[in-house]
Image (cartoon, grey):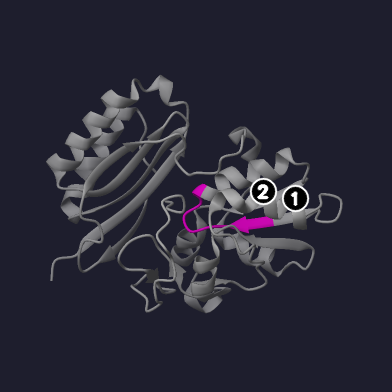
Amino acid sequence: MEEVQIISFYKFTDMSRVGDLPVLKNALAELLRTNEIFGTIILAEEGFNANLCGRPERIDPFLRSFAEITGFEPEYRSTFHSRAPFRKHEVKIKPEIVTFRHDVEIAFAAGTHVEPTEWNAIVSDPEVLVIDVRNDYEHRSGTFINAVNPSTVKFSELPDFVAARMDPSIHRKVAMFCTGGIRCEKFAPYLKQQGFKEVFQLKGGILNYLAEVPVEDQLWSGECFVFDERISLDKRLQKGGSPDLSQRHPDTAES
């Protein structure tokens, strides 16, 4: 059985330095087709976000060419499956690479990242408010011990949760996590801008944690929802058995 490699990566950066987005879109679409890479790349003025798959021998040539075209060498996460979870070659231009609909200065995220090996101590600290930045249906598939579920339908609702339920004078330490890290890259600086002093985000998200922390040491419970036909991954990053509780809202897809 031939194995398919699934990769995801993103970067927040000023894409005006790369070039005209429509031109870049055409170049990357051709690159996907040439290398038989399937999935979606989202381009915006604030950066890029990709969820892709292909035969393992095609991945490295694609990534090298991607770096040549954009000037950025992707820092990607990788899993494997028996068949391709994506079917199209898509490159889209959108207002945001992950839809938040609130102004955020990404630079405020500096110093907030926590390595997976240090995350258990954060989750276990009773002084830390741990927030599951994902949506309600994702949370129900699995989450970290002690995590709060904001019960959102889409990511852009989180500021309403902050306004109603959070207070910088009370919640002095706030930690957050999401699937691959991209939503936290926006939510962490947003909290800093709202006056929260100590903010932590899980670097690389849940998928990075499950890859780096031995199963016997994990404080993860359940499975991790993913935005492809696998639906969920278990603690060993193999296809899980969770049902699809989502409505596949386009605003929820992430790296």
Residue 111 appears in the rendering = no
Location of residue 207 in the rendering, given as x and y in whole percent from the top left corner? 45, 61
Query: Element at badge 1?
Result: helix
In the picture of the structure, the residue carrying the numbered disc 1 is: 163
Instruction: Name the one closer to the observer, 112 or 49.
Output: 49
What residue do we see at 46% from left, 74% from top?
223
Location of residue 95 in the rendering, given as x and y in whole percent from the top left corner? 45, 34
Magenta region includes residue 165: no
Q: Amino acid at mark 2?
A: Pro
Residue 118 appears in the rendering = yes
Residue 57 vs residue 195: left or right? Answer: left
Residue span colored magenta? 175-182
In the picture of the structure, the residue carrying the numbered disc 2 is: 159
* 111 over 71 or under it: above or below: below
Quarter where residue 189 is shown: top right
Residue 157 vs residue 125: left or right? Answer: left
**Label of residue 25 in the image:** none
Instruction: Name the one closer to the observer, 157 or 83.
Output: 157
Residue 5 vs residue 109: left or right? Answer: left
Magenta region includes residue 178: yes
Q: Amino acid at mark 1?
A: Ala
| Local crowd size for mark 2, using a 10 Å CA cut-off: few (<14), some (14–19), many (≥20) | some
Query: Element at badge 2?
Result: helix
Location of residue 165 in the rendering, given as x and y in whole percent from the top left corner? 76, 58
What residue do we see at 30% from left, 65% from top?
229
| Local crowd size for mark 1, using a 10 Å CA cut-off: few (<14), some (14–19), many (≥20) | few
Q: Quadrant of the N terminus?
A: bottom left
The answer to whether mark 1 and mark 2 are in CB contact below 8 A is: yes
Quarter where residue 175 is shown: bottom right
